[in-house]
Amino acid sequence: MAKGYWIARVDVADVEVYKSYVAANGIALAKYGARFLVRAGRYQIVEGVSRSRNVVIEFPSYQAALDCWHSSEYQAAVALRRPVATVDCVVVEGYDGAQPA
């Protein structure tokens, strides 16, 4: 079964208030087996545009990634984030097919 991923780009207007979102989202992320692969590390824009933070979170399955996003626990965290951050996020299914030789 292919894993699921959240791929998010984030701009934070108030870092102190954003910390409450980070604390709250851990409840849902742990419940659905999430694992951070990328969490606001260094980056270089090589094409297109970005936001100030980039995040990739891995889930055991695509369904787990969707269920986490729609969970009451995560949506409670989102309510804390919305006033202080702008986010672009997609939930995507991983790929288990052939790779370049």
Image (cartoon, rainbow, N blue to C red):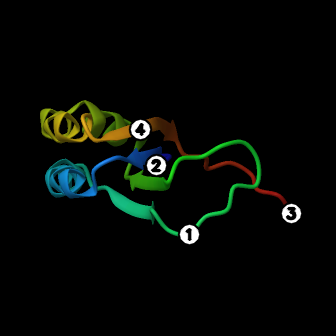
**What is the C-alpha distance between the residues marked 2 and 1?**
25 Å
Q: Residues within 10 Å of mark 2 (few under 14, many from 20)?
A: some
Residue 87 position by quadrant: top left
The picture places residue 58, in percent across and down from the top left corner, at: 42, 54
**What is the C-alpha distance between the residues marked 4 and 1?**
18 Å
- Please say if the residues under marks 3 and 4 sit with CB atoms less than 8 Å apart: no
Residue 56 against residue 63 in the figure, above or below: below
The picture places residue 27, in percent across and down from the top left corner, at: 14, 52
* 83 lies left or right of 97: left
Mark 2 vs 1, N-terminal side: 2
**What is the C-alpha distance between the residues marked 3 and 2?**
22 Å
**What is the C-alpha distance between the residues marked 3 and 4?**
36 Å
Q: Which of 61/22 is in front?
A: 22
The picture places residue 97, in percent across and down from the top left corner, at: 68, 48
Amino acid type, mark 4: Val
- Provide the residue designation for mark 4: 87
Residue 72 numbered tag: none
Secondary structure found at label 4: strand
Residue 101 numbered tag: 3
* 67 lies left or right of 38: left
Mark 3 vs 2, N-terminal side: 2
Residue 87 in view in this figure: yes
Secondary structure found at label 2: loop
Amino acid type, mark 1: Arg
Residue depicted at 51% across the width and 39% down the height: 93
Mark 4 vs 2, N-terminal side: 2
Q: Residues within 10 Å of mark 1 (few under 14, many from 20)?
A: few
- Label 4 or label 2, whichever lies nearer to me, is 4
- Provide the residue designation for mark 1: 42
Secondary structure found at label 3: loop
- Provide the residue designation for mark 2: 3
Amino acid type, mark 3: Ala
